[in-house]
Amino acid sequence: MTPHERGQHWLFAIAFILLVLTGMPIKFADSDWAAGLVSVMGGLTTTRKLHRICGVLLIAMFLYHVGYMLTRLMRQRRQARAAGSRESIWSMLWRSPVVVTPFDVRQFGQHLRYLLFRRRERPAFGEMNFRQKFEYWAVFWASGDGPQRAGAVVCVVGVGVRFGPALNFAFIIHSDEAYLAFIYIAVVHMFSVVFSAGGGAAVARQPDGPGRRRRNWRGHRGVLDAVAAEFGVKADDLGPERKRGVAVNILRRGYSAVLLGGVAGSASSRSGS
Amino acid sequence: MGRALLALAPWGSARAADTENCLSCHRFRGLSRLDPATGELRLFFCSEEYQAERQGPHAELRCTACHEREEVSVVPHHVKTRVDCARACHISRNSGVETRFSHEHIQETLQASVHAPTVLSGLPFETPLLRVGQSACLYCHDEPMFRPLGIKTRPPRGGEHARCDICHTDELPVEVPYFMRHVTSRLQPARPVRQLAQVCAVCHSDPTLIPSTGGHDAVASYLHSFHGKASLLGSTDTATCTDCHASETGNVHAMLRHDNPASSTSSGKLPDTCRTTACHPGAPPGMTVAAVHLNLDLHAGKPEFYVAAMFIALTAAVMVVFFILILLELFHAFVQRRNPNTRSTCVWLGRCSLGRTDAPACSA
């Protein structure tokens, strides 16, 4: 990822965290913690306003990202044209790292076989593996869903369109989809980033980045193979492994503690009830 | 003048309503009796302060205004007759003049409503909510108590009525403090939003009564709506059950079934009920199609149910798949810890996965 793309990611992340903090108490309004959290945030009116502001920010980020991706594609096309290539824009789009291809389905099967000890090596994932592509398009869908919900609400509160039934569906879809996004990000995405091999596409373009080689090696072997081939060497010869950074270790242990604490808390509340 | 008025005021002075001296026993907390028929311990405490400080409208009544004299004049009391709130009573004023009062007209209004006493008495409660002698009004009402206004107050300097003296040079009627509390109490809702939902839930969330009260848990669906969630999160100005279901006059005793064209929740009147100036002025009529009582039961067969079920299935499917992947990843990491320099598959198999016997240790 470029610094620009990282900036987009963190703006997305901030908006998402604030949306979770302001939205989950409303979804789980009958929970003990919900009223306390709303009270901490300044009451229901403030919470709802904050939620909508963050929703608008998320939609704005979505539109910005779509524009950014299109601009990037057009720039690549111009560069290809300047280099004499006649590759069509559809072909370039197909080669984009975010596009899901049958190859990803194949790699998913290979990865499953590897995890079941039926294959010796991990598949050589490229810049984005199947899980990262799933996350990318899930977030794309979730943030793109915002205008639809906002539109339904606007219709109801005063524009005058007779669009009432849409609110029932918007209410269910918005709420359940947000919950799916939340638990996915909190569990799977955080696991991918903190624990798993090839955790983030952010590191894939930095094969020699500090403290990340081991994860890149395992998670984005395809990229390293391509880089090694470019320099005429073997990927295995790129140097010794480095130890994991201190920050990554702290993050791993902190996430483990939060995850175990959450599981224990959930179990105790269930046994209590 | 003001001090003379204070001397006459009933504040803190024992009233003559307990002329039958019932409080000589019932003022003691814990006064109780073991019911030989049911084996239940029944409490009969009445607050002495309720009468002495006139904390509610019934403090001006004698006990026998509601309870049958013949049944309570013997000890232990043999109460058999249900209290009839529609019976005329006599309110004892400070002036000594007794005023006739009755809830009879409320009874008449109720009789024409969906909550007619005949309907309530026929409800098949699994465990009866009322004991022998208790009024059917107690399904919804508690013993009425005056409530101070919900704002912080402090006693004014010079006594409670010193400010009155600033303008009112003539003597104020002696009942002013009582009526002040009576009126300020009526200026606010009888119950907070959540408490009101709890009252309605007694019948409308009872599984044995749901078939006869609309077919689904109306209070649960309310609590899942925008209004219900707001009430759970502390909002005091969100719509309660009575805001929509009471008639245009706000008389909660005149509620009608939603299929009655005169009901405030009938399809013809619901848009106007939502679009009052206090709630959603100017909203399009179509907003009423957004269900406040969205019934997501399978048997209701609504399309919203299938959308909700699809999302639950989607969430479960996604999380199950990725949980399995996470567990397998963790297991691989665990296996690899035993021999970091060898691939986890080889560690697991206990031999080289390529079948080599002379290969050097391979890199993980």
Image (spheres, coloured by chain):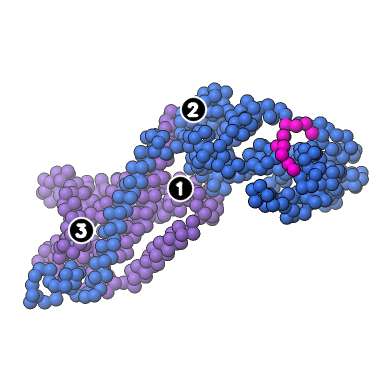
Image point (68%, 29%), residue name: B107
| Same-subunit check for callouts 1 and 2 | no
- Residue type at mark 3? Leu
Question: Residue B75: horizontal and vertical position, in percent?
Answer: 79, 47
**What residue occupies the far front of the structure in this picture?**
B36
For mark 3, name the chain. A
B191 versus A211 height, above or below: above
Say whether residue B110 is left or right of residue B178.
left
Question: Residue A68: horizontal and vertical position, in percent?
Answer: 29, 48
Question: Disc 2 on helix, strand or loop?
Answer: helix
Q: Looking at the rendered structure, which numbered label has been put on residue B285?
A: 2
Say whether residue B244 is left or right of residue B175.
left
Q: Can see residue B301?
A: yes
Question: Residue B91: horizontal and vertical position, in percent?
Answer: 82, 36
Do tag 1 and tag 2 residues touch (Cβ < 8 Å)? no
Please identify the dominant SS of the magenta region: loop
Q: Nearer the viewer, mark 1 or mark 2?
A: 1
Image point (21%, 65%), residue name: A218
- Residue type at mark 1? Lys
Question: Disc 1 on helix, strand or loop?
Answer: helix
* Mark 3 neighbour class, 10 Å CA radius: few under 14, some 14 to 19, many 20 or more: some
Image point (11%, 77%), residue name: B360
Q: Quadrant of residue A121?
A: bottom left
For mark 1, name the chain. A
Viewer-nearest residue: B221 or B39: B39
Q: Looking at the rendered structure, which numbered label has been put on residue A27?
A: 1
Tint applied to chain B in the drawing: blue
